[in-house]
Amino acid sequence: MDVRRDGAVAFAPVQLHLVPNRFSGKTAVVTGAAGGIGRATAVRLGAEGANVLCCDLQADAVEQTAATITEAGGTAVPRALDVSESAACSAAIDEAVSTWGGLDVLANVAGILGSSHTEQETDEQFRRILAVNLHGPFFTSRAAIPHLLERRGAIVNVSSTAGVMGQAYLSAYAASKHGVIGLTKSMAIEYARQGLRVNAVCPGGVDTAMTQGVSFPDDVNFHLILRAALVDEPQPPDSVAAALVWLASDEAIFVNGAVLSIDSGVAAG
């Protein structure tokens, strides 16, 4: 770790170590697996022994994720999936169960991002962001819960720093991610005595295609946007995947209803 002249901290790359066979014999469904956090999560689960159903709306890219897992000696199947479609989510869960005999882990990673002045937000964008970011985790979880209960499994949802604090020009996104935390905590309480754990991770600025592709209105106040950043370097997707996979593992057997910030301290203020 180095401190630059402007006082900002520059972090050296960290080597994240796999835990071989931690998920041997277990089955996981990962949404948003075509890239970013979802891809890193799917690849890590596969490398640690899980059978992985890799789901994403981007069919070609999610096939590449599955191929990466299988080429490394793991087991994975790709599936094109729009998580905003309830029936499609149920069918994806059914495929994982029918292929491998059960379900142990559901990682709800799929998400989209859109920026706007709140008074200029369109109905279409607001509804689409909630449909993917909030309805999707609900649809997949609802379908997966009966199977996860049989295996005393785990759900890990991806929220955001925008799920625990407000962020200017991201009202739809923040609303969806706050909703993910409410969904997480409610399910965690409801199913705790039946052995199902439900947790959430809240990443900060992660170096993904989604964050790179966001564009803010021309007349925004960037001081408001920079309130959500303490360090300059965006975090790598692997840093989030490592925490997500740990929460899904038996090592976190007593962790339930947790909301884990992975943001270099942004949400601590």
Image (spheres, rainbow, N blue to C red):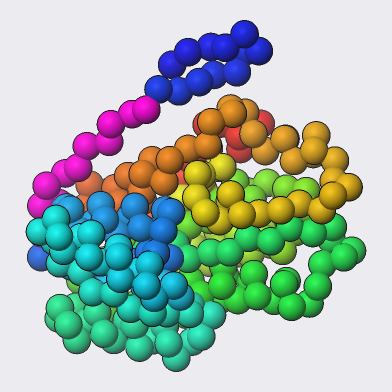
Which residue is painted at 84% across and 49% down in the image?
218
Q: Residue at x 50, y 50 (%)?
A: 208
Q: Which residues are magenta?
A: 13-24
Please say whether residue 21 is one of the residues in the magenta stretch. Answer: yes
**Dividing the picture into quarters, in which one does residue 56 lie?**
bottom left
Q: Visible in this render: residue 28? A: no
The relative height of residue 2 versus residue 240 in the rendered view (above or below) is above
Q: Residue furthest bottom?
A: 87
Q: Is residue 63 visible?
A: yes
Give the camera-side residue of 62 and 128.
Answer: 62
Viewport quadrant of the C terminus: top right
How many circles with numbers are drawn on the protein? 0
Residue located at (76% from left, 52% from top): 216
Position of 234 relative to 24 (above/below)? above
Q: In the rendered view of the protein, which quadrant contains the N terminus?
A: top left
Describe residue 130's horizontal placement relative to residue 249 as left or right. right
Give x and y (percent) for residue 131: 60, 76
What percent of the width, then of the height, locates residue 92?
34, 82
The percent coordinates of residue 180 (x first, y second) are 55, 63
Is 246 drawn above or below residue 230 in the view shown?
Answer: below
**Residue at x 43%, y 40% (from the top left corner):** 236
Q: Quadrant of residue 133?
A: bottom right
Q: Is residue 129 magenta?
A: no
Of 153 and 21, the residue lying toward us: 21
Q: Residue 264: horizontal and vertical position, in percent? A: 52, 31
Residue 98 is left or right of residue 34, and the answer is left
- Please, what is the dominant secondary structure of the magenta stretch? loop
